Image (tube, coloured by chain):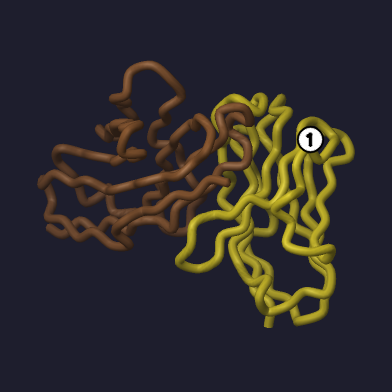
Amino acid sequence: GAGVSQTPSNKVTEKGKYVELRCDPISGHTALYWYRQSLGQGPEFLIYFQGTGAADDSGLPNDRFFAVRPEGSVSTLKIQRTERGDSAMYLCASSWDRGSEAFFGQGTRLTVV
Amino acid sequence: AQSVTQLDSQVPVFEEAPVELRCNYSSSVSVYLFWYVQYPNQGLQLLLKYLSGSTLVKGINGFEAEFNKSQTSFHLRKPSVHISDTAEYFCAVSDQWKGAQKLVFGQGTRLTINP
């Protein structure tokens, strides 16, 4: 595609439920990143994939958060037992490799009620 | 560990006036520096980046920034702003060894252009 695509654009879920957020990177980009942006804050790093493997997951806040990229393209961020504090904008970005510019998607706004 | 401080959370400016958005960083290693812009309900767009070489970096939409290693700053400037520049601006830093991954962002500066 022309840019990084994230779906859904908005997600409202009840506390305790499981959610999946999808990121479709720019075709050919080997590096993929997830960030979380709380209201009024800058984005915070969650996880970085190089190909299919998670090269750095040091930003995942706890074991309720998990991300996969099984074929080295589309990635899914999975959140179990959602809490109200998980409410935020989740941003995905991709780049040709770890040294080049990262292009961001428009984000998924997650609201946990 | 790295950190970024954007010294102003909000900057109101009149149209056609100059603007400077301030950014300071701290890091124990050599860094790459970035400025991103976020328009309402949109993702982040790269304005400019400093990787190496000339400390004055020119970006899109008439913006420029200057890397000052001794002051650990990377302030963003534009000589004459337009209404369309109204947006949130984020300064970010990354470890040179790690490249563009794992960006550390500041809290953002909301630039409001008044007619």
Measured as percent of width and height from the top left, residue B95 is found at 57, 34
Q: Which residue: 52% across, 38% down?
A: B28
Task: Quarter of the image for the C terminus of chain A: give it.
Answer: bottom right
For label 1, count other residues whose C-alpha is less than 10 Å away and answer few (under 14), some (14-19) or many (20+): many
Apparent side of residue B45 relative to residue B74 in the rendered image (left or right): right
Q: Secondary structure at mark 1?
A: loop
Q: Colour of chain B?
A: brown
Seen at 70% across and 32% down, the residue is A31
Question: Which chain does the numbered disc 1 sit on?
Answer: A
Marker count (numbered): 1
Q: Which residue is mark 1?
A: A73
Percent of width and height locating residue A94: 65, 36
Residue A74 in the figure: left or right of residue B79: right
Direction right: furthest residue? A70
Name the image quarter holding the N terminus of chain A. Answer: top right
Confirm whether residue B6 shows in the render. Answer: yes
Query: Considering depth in this image, is A32 or A107 the residue closer to the camera?
Result: A32
Residue A81 location, quadrant: bottom right
Position above or below: B2 against B53: below
Q: Is residue B7 left or right of residue A76?
A: left
> Compared with residue A17, is residue B92 higher up or lower down, i.e. above or below?
above
Label 1 amino acid?
A: Ser
What is the letter of the yellow chain? A
Residue B30 horizontal/vertical position (percent): 50, 29
Which image quadrant for residue A43?
bottom right
Can see residue B60? no
Residue pictured at 56% horizontal, 50% vertical = A106
